[in-house]
Image (cartoon, rainbow, N blue to C red):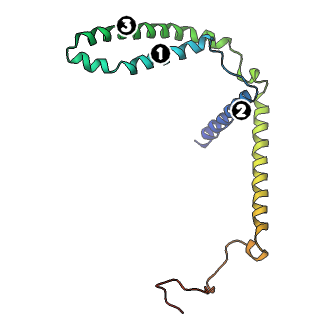
């Protein structure tokens, strides 16, 4: 179980580093790419369905104009879904032609992992430096961790508390 979790974490970190590198290189997806047409059609289907969902309630009340519009909308959705189905059948061949992410980013998985470990060690070093700076803010006696204040007597008393 833990091995799978660590593998998933490693994959997530690799993907995060790849996205960071893509942003650094100002890479973006080509909207004219065939794989992106499926995304565009899905957003079309979603917007049409959301904008016309009120027609189903109106057509149930025997509203003839709403019925006619609903049939046209359903035909439009059916055509879009048929187009999406054909796009999905071509998708594996299209995706096979796309070069791997590591190649497009000019980074191997090994270099990504080394950058991740380097950034992790830099973060731990900065945390220890920050802790060192915090420790230097206080006088020497207060740097030893928790202090026992059992014998400490405040100068002022808290209202409702008895003086000892």
Q: Position of residue 71 (x, y in %)?
A: 31, 8
- Is 73 displayed left or right of 152 in the figure? left
Q: Which mark is residue 44?
A: 1
- Image quadrant holding the C terminus, namely bottom right
**Helix, strand or loop at mark 3:** helix
CA–CA distance in space, label 1 to label 2:
30 Å
The residue sitting at 78% across, 52% down in the picture is 126
Q: Earlier in the sequence, mark 3 or mark 1?
A: 1
- Image quadrant holding the N terminus, namely top right
Relative depth, front residue between 86 and 60: 60
Q: Position of residue 74 (x, y in %)?
A: 35, 10
Q: Is residue 101 above or below residue 85?
A: below
Mark 2 = which residue?
A: 20
The reply to whether the C-beta atoms of the residues labelled 3 and 1 are less than 8 Å apart is no
Q: Badge 2, how many Cα within 10 Å: few under 14, some, many 20+?
A: few
Q: Position of residue 116 (x, y in %)?
A: 75, 39
CA–CA distance in space, label 3 to label 1:
14 Å
The reply to whether the C-beta atoms of the residues labelled 1 and 2 are less than 8 Å apart is no
**Helix, strand or loop at mark 2:** helix
- In the image, which is nearer the foreground, mark 1 or mark 2? 1
Q: Which mark is residue 75?
A: 3
């Amino acid at each position: 179980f833990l091995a799978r979790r660590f593998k998933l974490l490693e994959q997530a970190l690799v993907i995060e580093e790849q996205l960071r590198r893509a942003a650094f290189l100002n890479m973006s997806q080509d909207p004219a790419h065939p794989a992106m047409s499926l995304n565009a059609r899905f957003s079309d289907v979603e917007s049409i369905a959301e904008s016309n969902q009120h027609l189903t309630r109106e057509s149930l009340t025997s509203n003839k104009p709403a019925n006619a519009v609903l049939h046209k909308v359903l035909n439009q959705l059916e055509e879009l879904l048929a187009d999406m189905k054909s796009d999905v059948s071509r998708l594996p061949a299209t995706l096979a032609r796309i070069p791997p992410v590591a190649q497009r980013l000019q980074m191997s998985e090994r270099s990504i992992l080394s950058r991740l470990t380097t950034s992790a060690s830099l973060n731990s070093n900065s945390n220890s430096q920050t802790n060192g700076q915090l420790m230097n803010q206080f006088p020497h006696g207060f740097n030893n961790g928790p202090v026992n204040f059992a014998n400490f007597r405040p100068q002022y008393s808290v209202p409702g508390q008895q003086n000892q």
